[in-house]
Image (cartoon, rainbow, N blue to C red):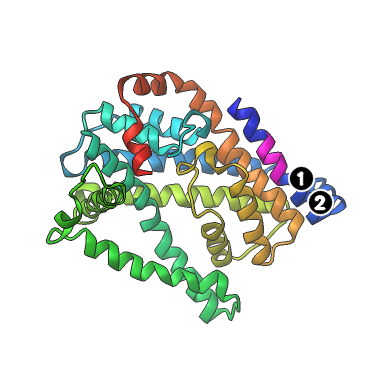
Amino acid sequence: MLVVASVVVALAAGIPLAYVAGRTRVLDTLGHWHPIWLLVCLGAEALAYVGYVFALRETARVNGGPRLSYGHAFKVVAAGFGAFFAASASGGFEIDYLAFRHAGASRRQAVARVLGLSTLEYVVLAPVAMVAALVLYFGEAFQRPALTLPWLAVVPGFALALWCSSPKRAHWFLDEPHHRRLRRGIAHAVAGLTILRGLLTQPFRHGLAFVGVALYWFSDLACLWAALQMFGAHLGLLKLLVAYATGYVISRRGLPAGGVGVAEVLLTFAFVWFGVPFAPALLAVFGYRIFNLWLALIPAYVCQTTVARLRSDVPPAPLREAA
């Protein structure tokens, strides 16, 4: 039922966009696609799984946490990428929480690791996107400050994260009173930042976490680039990076059903804002989502017994409170 509903949502998002782009232009662009790029999309998304497996394992074991085998970590990642098997308010991150709990982490440790993993994604992506945006604005005279200058918020964001997670003051926030939801949420967030700080301060032991996330983002971006090439759309690397980061602020693991409908609209308009014609942008985004979202159902379906076992063993409610 969720798959059918998500297909309806995707069509409800795509059909009006196709009318805006012009039905004739969309059909003409679709008639001149280049199928060779399908192989690049498929290979890039397969590589993204490998990168995320590294990130998941290192986040699990940092600061004396549980160790996950590569095989089990791959099943967890595959289930999280197959968003319809993680239909909850916390998306694919709930599967990560269940895996950490099943491996022996306490409730608070598991929540902290999940939030640390989600923050790790953007610790790698956000600075790169900020640099690319600033180069566009100051170096290439790309006069669209609404698309570039907001990335400067990364600087105070990093400063605040470092301040809160410092060993000298982290304990101020880590108290988790049960009667105050806001205070409990802050405690969870700071606990996630301390996990991230543990990864940062032990680069020789946990450097694979950053390598893995970088590989994940690079591979997913390569899939999107190949989808643009498939429909004859061309975009410079810096613009592609900023458009991708702008239109895909929440990863597919962070929303139920992989953010279906939302990501398609945001990415399409992000590319249009950066100069890609509407019809190729629309088709490229939907082509990319075939590999990024819909084909991910196949490995997730194969791993569904792992998800069922995790859900039967661990109650997921605490993560929903932290989401």
* Residue sitting at the far right: 24
Residue with the mark numbered 1: 15
Q: Mark 2 points at which residue?
A: 19
As rendered, which of 228 and 308 lies closer to the eye?
308
Instruction: Return the residue found at the far left.
Output: 168
Please determine whether, in this image, residue 159 is positioned above or below residue 46.
below
| Residue occupying the point 56% across, 41% down | 292
Amino acid type of disc 1? Ile
Magenta residues?
8-13
Q: Main secondary structure of the magenta part?
A: helix
Q: Is residue 153 above or below residue 17?
A: below
- Alpha carbon separation for disc pair 1 and 2: 6 Å
Q: Left of 162 or right of it: where is 258? A: right
State yes or no: residue 10 in magenta: yes
Image quadrant holding the C terminus, namely: top left
Query: Residue 156 location, x and y as percent?
Result: 34, 70
Q: What element does badge 1 sit on?
A: helix
Amino acid type assigned to the residue bearing label 2 in the image: Tyr
Where is residue 266? Give x, y as percent: 61, 55
| Residue located farthest toward the front when viewing the structure as drawn | 179
| Relative height, residue 142 to residue 73 (above, below) | below
